[in-house]
Image: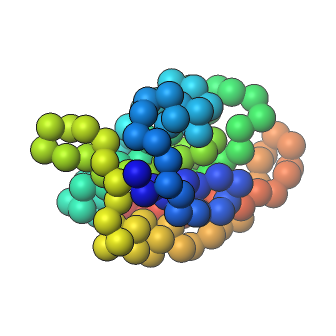
Amino acid sequence: MKVLVLSNGELKEKEIDNTLDEIQKIVGGYIEFPFLGNKFKDNVIDVIINEEGKFIEGLKPEIAIVNEKIGSIMDIVYGNCVFASHDKEGNTVALTDKQIEIVKEELETVIELMNKDTLENFEVRALFI
């Protein structure tokens, strides 16, 4: 199954087995399907993340969800992300070429943030919703 994987700031096309075990291996644990805006929803694009990613020490921030109207960060997604689609029955399926282009366009902006506790800078992909 063709998916996109965001890991360490890099968005790459990958062919993976369409199994829960394979997806859990990529995200490093139990999975969650957060809502990341209407553009993904309207184009039947799912993002699959580690449901405990924010609480696992050592996972890097990957996506900053930014409210486009007010310019503030609403949330940050930590750890590897898998972008896939789903069929009418809700089964996870491969992305089409058009869906791949949508994800790449939506995540093309990279922003630099600072951890206020450690004063460390880090880069994340920005998703404007």
For this view, does 30 lie left or right of residue 123? left
Quadrant placement of the C terminus: bottom left
**Residue 79: where, in percent of width, then height?**
63, 41
Total of numbered circles in the picture? Answer: 0
Place residue 88 in its image quadrant: top left
Q: Is residue 111 above or below residue 50?
A: below
Whether residue 2 is visible to the viewer of this picture, yes or no, is yes
Q: Position of residue 58 (x, y in %)?
A: 77, 35
Whether residue 65 is visible: no
Q: Residue furthest left?
A: 88
Q: What residue is drawn where x is 44% and y is 75%?
A: 105
Is residue 127 shown left or right of residue 95? right
For the point 25% across and 46% down, which residue is it? 86
| Quadrant of the rendered image containing residue 35 | top left
Q: How is the image coloured?
A: rainbow
Is 80 or 38 nearer to us in this picture? 80
Residue 112, x across and y down, in percent? 71, 64
Residue 104 position within the rendered picture, expressed as x and y whole percent measured from the top left = 47, 71
Is 99 above or below relative to 45? below
Q: Residue at x 65, y 67 (%)?
A: 111
